[in-house]
Amino acid sequence: MAVPNPPTSRDVARLAGVSQATVSYALTGRGTIAAATRERVLRVAESIGYRPNLAARSMRTRRSGRLAVVTGATLDNQLRLLAGAGEVAEAAGFVMETHTVDGTVEERTARVCDLAGSRQYEGILTLVPVLPEALSEPSDDAPAGQDDGATPVVAEATFDEQMRTLGDLADASTVEVFVEALVAAGYRRFVHVAGPEQFASARARRDVYVTSVARAAADPATPDVVSLGVLGGSWSGDDARRAVAEIPADALPVAVVAANDFLAAGVLRGAAERGWSVPGDLVVTGWDNVEMGAFMMPSLTTVAVDFPEAGRAVMRRLVAAIRGEPRPGPGRPIHRIVWRESSGDLPGVAPGPAPGPPR
Amino acid sequence: MAVPNPPTSRDVARLAGVSQATVSYALTGRGTIAAATRERVLRVAESIGYRPNLAARSMRTRRSGRLAVVTGATLDNQLRLLAGAGEVAEAAGFVMETHTVDGTVEERTARVCDLAGSRQYEGILTLVPVLPEALSEPSDDAPAGQDDGATPVVAEATFDEQMRTLGDLADASTVEVFVEALVAAGYRRFVHVAGPEQFASARARRDVYVTSVARAAADPATPDVVSLGVLGGSWSGDDARRAVAEIPADALPVAVVAANDFLAAGVLRGAAERGWSVPGDLVVTGWDNVEMGAFMMPSLTTVAVDFPEAGRAVMRRLVAAIRGEPRPGPGRPIHRIVWRESSGDLPGVAPGPAPGPPR
DNA sequence: CTGAAAGCGCTTACAG
DNA sequence: CTGAAAGCGCTTACAG
């Protein structure tokens, strides 16, 4: 059977009795065109199922309408982030291509640079951390609309000179809220169960923990605040479970700030093995608001991360960069503490909904 | 400052002292060309940083090299699936565009049809269930290479006439293994805590539960096997917690097959509220192998789903459809039971690694 | 307000 | 083995 070629704008022009240029004007809304002519062209186009060939259009306009998003394979929450980013991209008239990369920072950076150099994309969004050299976002004071020809590359997270990661998702300032609330509730001895060094989020949470506890200890009102140490160092809940063994029994009660919910869950298990109650002997906080956390016994106090909003925010930045507009201001906060049973009763804190009595 | 236009194949041709056609032959490997000429062209292309304009190539070859993947926003595990799919797509020379859709089945189906009709893609993979009318995968007995001009559309999951979903991820046969193992271990009274009706996976797990228990009851060796009911009906762990209240106290011990890990976690909490032990008064199984499940007390017996492999498998199907090749045979199984504490000791079953003693 | 013409950057028969 | 030429399907100054 013969494959009928899809109709072209020339077909529409012939059937509507106009020129190809007129069809183009009617469809794109550019140029000046009589309303009646426009009507007729659109009707004909519709009737024969005309769909413009985007490759041809792209060649002519030198605009691909395509964005590349670079993701890693492991971070599951990123699909929600992608959905938020896609929403903004679509509204701005772009389609999004996803490229999964892994490997070292250098390899990932090289991949992003390669994509930027391909000139196939109007912009690139990377969700995996890359070195700053891969990035190009017009500076705020550049005249709007300026285009130096480079493909804008925007990152959710980027390594700075000290190989730390910057980015909304890596923001760990919420840890300070935990520490302050627990100090206010009377806790004096703290432990951090950290994630792996190579994760920016893990480093950020550890750093904020260290400085927050130090600040509380420096406060004349609470000179007895002390950190018993930074334990763990992986995302393994099992390591967190074992870390509990390192907490001296005579230090109870102890406040444990875990770098994420898995680690917090491991701490709960480790506490049970030592016969310690939570809350009571230990209070524990997590991070990520993993769904299961609400059903642990005790339910986990944690940090809810608004991934779709993080995706929207970073995509807004990319779209602005493409359009040569200034970088948009910060959007809604993406972190929110969910207080539950594992942190015990805290003064001045509204507990989040718990599914039921602890036991 | 002037924006230098990126070099074209014509530039390469001029600098290499050959025609544009020769450049094309050298780069694509098509046509016949002297090795020396080829070398020279490639060297020149490299030296001026030539990157072919894919839009132009696409217009000429009528091949976009692009695939669309349609995802929903809510299913987090799909990012791992996407990574697997992307791996296969890249190896086959395609780039993947993601489109997030939501809404009713009809709306999603319409969206997929629209993407197929856009003729921008060489193939479409949908991870969200759509009606069969959106699908077009060459039948197995069609001659290889035949192309009726329609864009191949392959689905991970699709609704059949009875609005059930078919697809590897919706395969629930593992539930039968749970039921059989629990019957063999001596359990006679069963409960299913189901997910919401509108989820194919939830329906599939419920159906397999119902038929498996019925089959065991019909077995002369175990006539006393009985289902106490199908409870729940949402993905809310809190509903699962409340469902435990509906289990008659005089029915213990009861085997609870939950449709996923959240529901199983809710059951654990509900059991604790009634003062029931798990395992002991209840045994509980989940689904999804959510990371936290290993750290619940007791740790959750569950089903691990190999999402990257599911992604690879379905992308292999799409690539085969595009190439007019027959549908590839089934790949590796994607479901695997992880036995942990919540199902108790079962004869003939190797327990999965548990992080430590239950309490 | 509309049309004729050029051209975006490639690939591919075809001729030599 | 290589080159001259056509053409993929659009958009856009430009002329009328």
Image: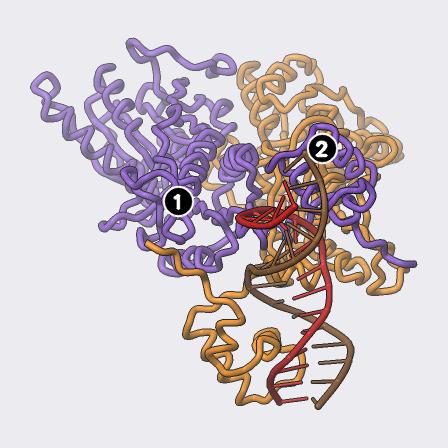
Chain colours: A purple, B orange, C brown, D red
Image quadrant of residue A173?
top left
In this rendering, position of residue A102 left or right of residue A146: right
Looking at the picture, do discs 1 and 2 lie on one chain? yes
Residue A110: give x, y in percent of width and height.
40, 60
Q: Looking at the image, which residue is at 41% across and 58% down?
A: A113
Identify the image quadrant of residue A246.
top left
**Above/below status of B150 relative to A348:** below
Q: Which amino acid, by three-letter code, is at mark 2?
A: Arg
Q: Mark 1 points at which residue?
A: A154
**Disc 1 secondary structure class:** strand
**Nearer the N terminus, badge 1 or badge 2?**
2
Residue drawn at 35 percent across, 31 percent down: A274
Nearer to us in this view, B278 or A312: A312
**Amino acid of disc 1:** Val
The numbered dot on residue A192 is none
Q: Position of residue A32 (x, y in %)?
A: 62, 34
Chain at numbered mark 1: A
Q: Which chain carries label 2?
A: A
Please name the residue that numbered disc 2 is placed on: A38
Above or below, A179 relative to B118: above
Q: Is residue B178 visible?
A: no
- Tag 2 secondary structure: helix
Residues packed near mark 1 inside 10 Å, few (<14), some (14 to 19) or many (20 plus): many
